[in-house]
Image (tube, grey):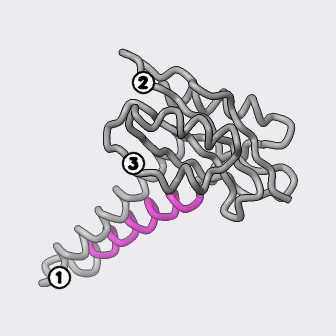
């Protein structure tokens, strides 16, 4: 739930140049249909054959994969994209130790994301940095958060970096 609040605040900060595209459900639906079709074909034409169980398992696995993708797509309905170029923004999440707090804040305020990414990471550290960016890095949204007892609170404003 905290990630959804964080993501929504990032969307709100970049509303002038960010858009949301609805995810496409074609691949999950095709996977489900292909898996069901394989299972039916195996059941009709290969019943009792030595490889019939393998064929059924293949059909089941493809169907389950499609169903899993479908559920994930329903949970995460929208994909952020950069309005100017139409390119998708990818979400990255980094965790750092408390002793790196000042350095993290300094790098974010300067817009030096490469140096931030070069810092040593912690596994379950109290500071989380969320970065949304295009693959070409022509747009980045960055914010650092600090863990409290039950959620995360921002320790920096949302930094918007546009490289043209």
Q: Position of residue 143 (x, y in %)?
A: 61, 35
Marks 3/2 in contact by CB < 8 Å: the verdict is no
Q: Residue 31: within the magenta?
A: yes
Could you tell me what secondary structure mostly forms the magenta stretch? helix
User: Which residue has dot 1 on it?
Assistant: 51
Is 79 or 147 nearer to us in this picture?
147
Q: Position of residue 80 (x, y in %)?
A: 69, 45
Q: Earlier in the sequence, mark 3 or mark 2?
A: 3
Q: Label 3 crowding class (10 Å Cα cut-off): few <14, some 14-19, many 20+?
A: some
The alpha-carbon separation of the residues under discs 1 and 2 comes to 53 Å
- Look at 39% across and 30% down and name the residue there: 126
Compared to residue 99, the image places residue 45 above or below, namely below
Q: Earlier in the sequence, mark 1 or mark 3?
A: 1
- Look at 72% across and 47% down and name the residue there: 21
Q: Earlier in the sequence, mark 1 or mark 2?
A: 1
Is 22 or 155 nearer to us in this picture?
155
Secondary structure, mark 3, is loop
Magenta-tinted stretch = 26-43
Rendering quarter of residue 78: top right
Secondary structure, mark 1, is loop
Compared to residue 88, the image places residue 142 above or below, namely above
Q: Residue 81: within the magenta?
A: no
Q: Which mark is residue 97?
A: none
Instruction: Look at discs 1 and 3 and give the one toward the viewer.
Output: 3
Marks 1/3 in contact by CB < 8 Å: the verdict is no
Rendering quarter of residue 96: top left
User: Which residue has dot 3 on it?
Assistant: 121
């Amino acid at each position: 739930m905290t990630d959804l609040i964080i993501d929504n605040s990032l969307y709100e900060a970049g509303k002038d140049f960010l858009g949301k595209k609805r995810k496409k459900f074609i691949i999950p639906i095709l996977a489900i249909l292909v898996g069901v079709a394989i299972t039916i074909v195996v059941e009709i034409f290969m019943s009792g054959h030595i490889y019939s169980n393998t064929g059924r398992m293949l059909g089941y696995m493809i169907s389950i994969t499609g169903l899993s993708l479908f559920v994930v797509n329903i949970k995460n309905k929208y994909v952020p994209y950069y309005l100017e170029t139409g390119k998708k923004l990818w979400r990255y999440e980094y965790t750092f130790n408390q002793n790196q707090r000042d350095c993290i804040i300094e790098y974010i305020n300067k817009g030096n994301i490469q140096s931030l990414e070069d810092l040593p990471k912690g596994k379950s550290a109290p500071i989380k940095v969320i970065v949304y960016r295009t693959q070409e890095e022509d747009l980045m949204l960055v914010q650092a958060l600090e863990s409290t007892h039950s959620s995360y609170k921002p320790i920096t404003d949302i930094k918007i970096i546009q490289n043209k």
